[in-house]
Image (cartoon, rainbow, N blue to C red):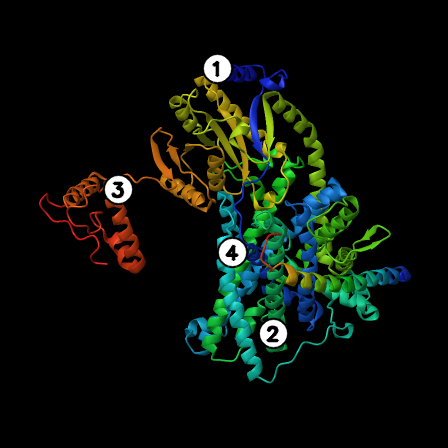
Amino acid sequence: MPGFRLLLLCTCMATSDKTLPESNRVRIVVATTVMLTFISYWRAAAVVLNDLGSSAFYAAGIAERAIGKSAPWFILAVMLFSFAVRAVYVESCSMFVRGGVYRVVKEALGGTLAKVSVSALMFDYILTGPTSGVSAGQYIAGLVNEILAAADAYGWTPSAVHSLFQGAPHINQNTAAVLLAVAVTLYYWWQNIKGIEQSSEKALRVMEITTLMVILLLGWSIVTLLTRTDWHFPPLPVASNLHFTSESLGFLKQHPSIPELFGVFGICMAFGHSILAMSGEETLAQVYREIAHPKLKNLKRTALIIAIYSFIFTGGASLLAVMLIPDKPRLEVYNDNLIAGLAMYMVGPQILRLAFRTFVVVVGFLMLSGAINTSIVGSNGVLNRVSEDGVLTEGFRKPHKKYGTSYRIINLIVGLQVITIIASRGNVYVLGEAYAFGLIWSFVFNSLSMLVLRFKYKEQRGWKVPPTLTIRGLEIPVGLASVHLVLLATAIANLFTKSVATIAGLVFTITLFLVFTASERVNRRRFSLAREEMREQFQLLKEETVGREAIDLRPGNVLVTIRDYHTLHHLRWVLQRIDTREQDIVVMEVRLVGAGAAAYDLSMDQIFSGYEQTLFTRAVSIAESFGKHISLLVIPARDVGSAIVQTAHSLESSIVVAGLSSKMAPQEQSFYLGRAWEAMREPKRPFIFQVVRPDLSVETHTIGPHTPSLRPEDVHLTHRLWLQLTRIPGLESLHHSDIISLALTRLARDYTCHEHEVIAQFKSGKDKRFGLPAPLKPDEKPPNPTANG
Amino acid sequence: MDLLIKFGIRIVETMFVAGIIGSAIVIVWVGLEDLRTIFKPGEE
C-alpha cells in the first residue's frame, strides 16, 4: 500500500503538464475552521473596551471644539445609541459566526458594495492608529509641560534654562505628539512583523488598571463636586446652545444659520460630530468567534458590559470635564488631553493631583497604544482577507521569510499611518473628524445589509433586533430600520459638515476601491491559471475540522510542522528514521490568520494559496526522494502553538517534529507548546516534541504530564530508603513507588503550608539536591515519615 | 436650489427623528430583555 501511494506521488509530480484523474493527485486536507482558543465574556469585553474605551481620551475634546459646551450630552447620547448599534452586531453575529462588515455586506449587497464598505472600514482602521497615537503623545507632552511648569514655579529650573525659554521651560506639544506617535507605531509595526498576537490576558490587565483609574476619577470628582460650588452642568442639547465653528460647518459654512434654522438638523450635525465616541464596535464582531459557549448569551453579556462601561467612562468623563474644568483652560490647554485636565481640577494638594494625572497618562498611553496595535492587526486582517479573495495580488500576502507574517501588507498599513501622523502635525481634532467618516459609513453599510438580509434570508436566526412588526405575514424590522435611519441621517449630515473627512475619506475610499477593482481584474486570469495548475497537482479535501479518519492515519503517527520551504531539514530527518509501513507521517502547515481574517469565512482557495503550493510541492518531492508516503494538511489558526497541540490531539500523534524556530530556542518552543497544551480542554494526551536543528542535532521534550527522568543519585536514594523501610515488620510489601508517592505528598503539603520556604529551597538548591540529606547508610535508621508535620 | 437644500434637510431630519424614537425603543426593549435572560444560569 505505501508503495502504491508512492507511485501515485511520483506520477503526479512527473506529469504536471497534464490534468490527472482525481485519484492520482496529491491529497491535501485543508481545514476551513480557524483553530481558536475560546475566551470568557469578561475577556471579550476587555478586548473590545481596549479599542472602544480609548476614544474616551479624545472624543469629548474633539466634539466640544466642533459643537460647543453642550458636547457631553451628545457624547452620552452616542454612548446610549451605541447600545442599539451593538444590537445590530449581535444579530449579524447570530447569523454569521464569522461576521464583520465585509462578510455581511458581501452576502447582502454583493462584491462591489462589499469592496466599498471595506474601503471605508480601511479608512477607519488606518486613521484609528494615528488618532490614538497622537492623542497619547498629547497626553504625555501635556504632562511633561505641567511638570516643567510646576518645577519652574518652585524655582527648581536653572536660571539659564528659564531665560532661554523666557519663562517656564516647555516642549512643543504637537511636535512631541507626532514623534511619540511615530515611535509607538513603529514599535507595533515591528511587533506585527514578528507576529506577536494580541492577547486577551493583556487586554484584561489593561482594563483592570483602567477600571481603577475610572473609580478614582469618578470618586474624586464626586468629592470635588460636593466640596466646590463653582461647577455647573453643560448647557442643554438644544439647537440654540450649539455653537458650530466654520470648521465644523464644513461645506455649510456659506449658510451658518442652517443648524439653528432647522433645529433638528443642527442636533443631527452635533450627533455626527460626537459619533467617533463609539469607535471600536467592529472589534465586537471580530472577537465573537473566540467567545466561549454559550456564544450568543456570552456575546450579549459582552455587549452589555461594554455598554455600561463605555457609558460611565466615556460619557461620565466628558460630562465631568465640562463641569469641573473652567472654560478657558479646558479649551486652550486641555482640549486634547481632557481627562488629564480633569485630574488637575480635583480638590486636594497639587502633588496628589499631579500624581493622579501621571496615572491617567500611563493608563491613557496603555489604552491608546493598544488601539494602535488593534488598528494594525485589524487592517492587516481585512487586507489579507481581501487579498485572499483575489482582489490584491498574491505578492501582498507573501509571508515574511523569518516570521511568516504578511509583512508587505503590514508595511503598507504602517507606511500610510506614519504619513498620516506626520501630515496631521499633531492635530487630534483633524484626525478625529476624518476618522469618523470611515466609522459611520461602515456602520451604515452593516446596518443596511442586515436590513436587506431580513428580507433576503427569512429563516430563523439566533436573535433579531426588536421590535419586529408582522402585518399580513410581512415582517417589518422596525428596530433595525430605526438604527439604520439614525446612522444614515448622521452619515449624510457628516458628509456636508465634515469637509476634511469627506474629501479625505472619499479620495481614500475611491482610490482603494479602484485599486481593488483594477487588481481584481488583472488577477482574475492569473488566479484562474494558478488554480488550474493547482488542481492538476493537488486534490484539496475540505474538512470543517481535522480528524484522524479524514486523513486516513493510524494512531501514534508523527506530525511534522513546516512553514518555510527553504528549511525542511527536519522533514528529511524524520523521513530518514521513520518506517512509514509502521508509522504514518503527516506534514502540516499552520496558516497564520490575523484577528480580522478569523472573523471571515475562509474558503479552500484562500487557505491553500500559491505559497502553500510551493511549500507542499517541495515537501512531496523530499518524500519522493526517500520513497516514502506523507499525508498533507493545512490548518488556519490564530496561534501556532494551539493549532499544533490541538491537531496532535485530534490526529492521535505520538511525536511532533519541528525545525528550529527563528524566534525561540528549542526549550522556549517546548515551553510555548506546553502552555498551549495546558490551556487545552480535557481529555488530552501527552506527546513527544522534537526540535531538529539545521545540523540535525535533536532536542527532545515531553509535552504534558510524564514520568520524570530521575538522576542516578535520586534512584539510589529511593532504593536505599526502600531497603531500610522494608526491614521494618509490616512494611515488607512496600514498593519504590510508595516512597516517591509519600515524598511528593509531603512536598505538596509543605508547599501548601510553607509556600515561600519551599520556593526558596528550590531556588537556593546549589547542588540541585535542594538540601536533602545525604543517602542513608545501610545500617542507618530511616526518618519517621509521619513526623515533622 | 435653496428649496432643494431645504427639502433634503427636512428628509434627513425626519429620518433622524424617526430613527431616534425607534432606537430608544430598541435600547429599552433590548435592555429589559437582557436583564431578564442573559444572567439566568443555563445554556442558550
Residues under labels 4 and 3: Cα distance?
45 Å
Which residue is nearer to you in this view: B36 or A169? B36
Q: Same chain for labels 2 and 4? Say yes or no.
A: yes
The correct choice, above or below, for A731 with respect to A321 in the image is above
Circle 2 residue: A320
Mark 4 surroundings within 10 Å by alpha-carbon count, few (fewer than 14), some (14 through 19), many (20 or more): many
Circle 1 residue: A3
Q: Same chain for labels 1 and 3? Say yes or no.
A: yes
* Residue A351 rendering spot, x and y as whole percentages: 45, 76
Furthest residue toward left: A779
Which residue is nearer to you in this view: A211 or A37? A37
Point out the frontmost of discs 4 and 1: 1
Circle 3 residue: A737
Where disc 4 sits, the SS reads helix
Q: Same chain for labels 4 and 3? Say yes or no.
A: yes
Mark 2 surroundings within 10 Å by alpha-carbon count, few (fewer than 14), some (14 through 19), many (20 or more): many
Residues under labels 1 and 3: Cα distance?
47 Å
> Which is nearer the N-term, disc 4 or disc 3?
4
Residues under labels 3 and 2: Cα distance?
67 Å
Query: Mark 2 belongs to which subunit?
Result: A
Decide if residue A295 is in sight here.
yes
Which residue is nearer to you in this view: A260 or A480? A480
Residues under labels 2 and 4: Cα distance?
26 Å
Circle 4 residue: A203
> Which is nearer the N-term, disc 2 or disc 1?
1
Residues under labels 4 and 1: Cα distance?
52 Å
Q: Residue at x 51, y 47 (%)?
A: A197
Q: What's the residue type where badge 4 is placed?
A: Ala
Q: Are marks 2 and 4 in contact (CB under 8 Å)?
A: no
* Residue A742 rendering spot, x and y as whole percentages: 26, 49
